[in-house]
Amino acid sequence: MDITRFKNITMKKLNLIACAVSLSLLGSACTPTNHIRGNIVEDFRLAEVKPGIDTRSDVLRKLGSPTTKAPFDENVWYYIGQETQKRGILDEDIQKERIVMATFDQEGTLASIEELDNNRLDLPYEREKTPTTGNEVTAVQQFFGNVGRFNKQR
């Protein structure tokens, strides 16, 4: 066998192996990352809560702390949860989202609990920088601009 032909065959095999290794590494680098934020109330926990019977402390025990309370009404609690998935450098995709609103009467008894339809708008992200007013100063201008501005030693 000619040595040049042997080198060409060996180089082709090495190139194929290198491509296979790089593709496998690339595939594993894009493994999705899942994140859960807030408090996603499960169906079985929601079924445990009974309006007209349960109090605030019962709801806290069964569902956990609310994500937020209404700003102008302490008798309205919101449980907001979201599960997202991120692949590599791409933006996160929302996999699951749930908003539950619990309303209490003046005595602290649960009046109603319902799941809200979020009707989310899909707004595009703007990746450009916001222009700011002022001067853009280079490092040299900044250096010479500061000369003589310091307090004299006494």
Image: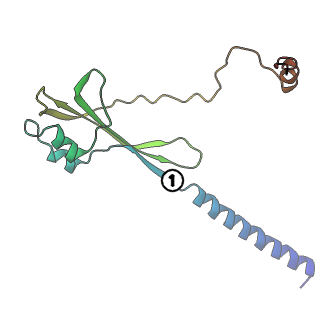
- From the viewer's side, name the closer residue of 145 and 137: 145
Bin the neighbour count of mark 1 within 10 Å (Cα to Cα): few under 14, some 14-19, many 20 and up.
few
Residue lying at 92% horizontally and 77% vertically, measured from the top left: 4
Residue 110: image location, x then y, percent: 13, 34
Q: Is residue 8 left or right of residue 61?
A: right
Residue lying at 38% horizontally and 30% vertically, measured from the top left: 120
* Residue on which the image places disc 1: 32
Q: Is residue 141 left or right of residue 58?
A: right
> Residue pushed farthest front?
154
- From the viewer's side, name the closer residue of 111 and 15: 111
Residue lying at 31% horizontally and 23% vertically, measured from the top left: 71
Asked if 86 appears above or below 99 in the picture, the reply is below
Residue lying at 89% horizontally and 85% vertically, measured from the top left: 1
- From the viewer's side, name the closer residue of 56 and 85: 56
Quarter holding residue 143: top right
Q: Is residue 62 left or right of residue 79?
A: left
Q: Report the quarter where the C terminus lies.
A: top right
Q: How many marks?
A: 1
What's the image's color scheme?
rainbow
Residue 85: image location, x then y, percent: 47, 47
Asked if 133 appears above or below 88 in the picture, the reply is above
Secondary-structure class at tag 1: loop
Residue 73: image location, x then y, percent: 24, 23
Quarter holding residue 122: top left
At label 1, the amino acid type is: Pro
Residue 111: image location, x then y, percent: 12, 31
Quarter holding residue 102: top left
> Residue pushed farthest left?
53
Asked if 93 appears above or below 119 in the picture, the reply is below
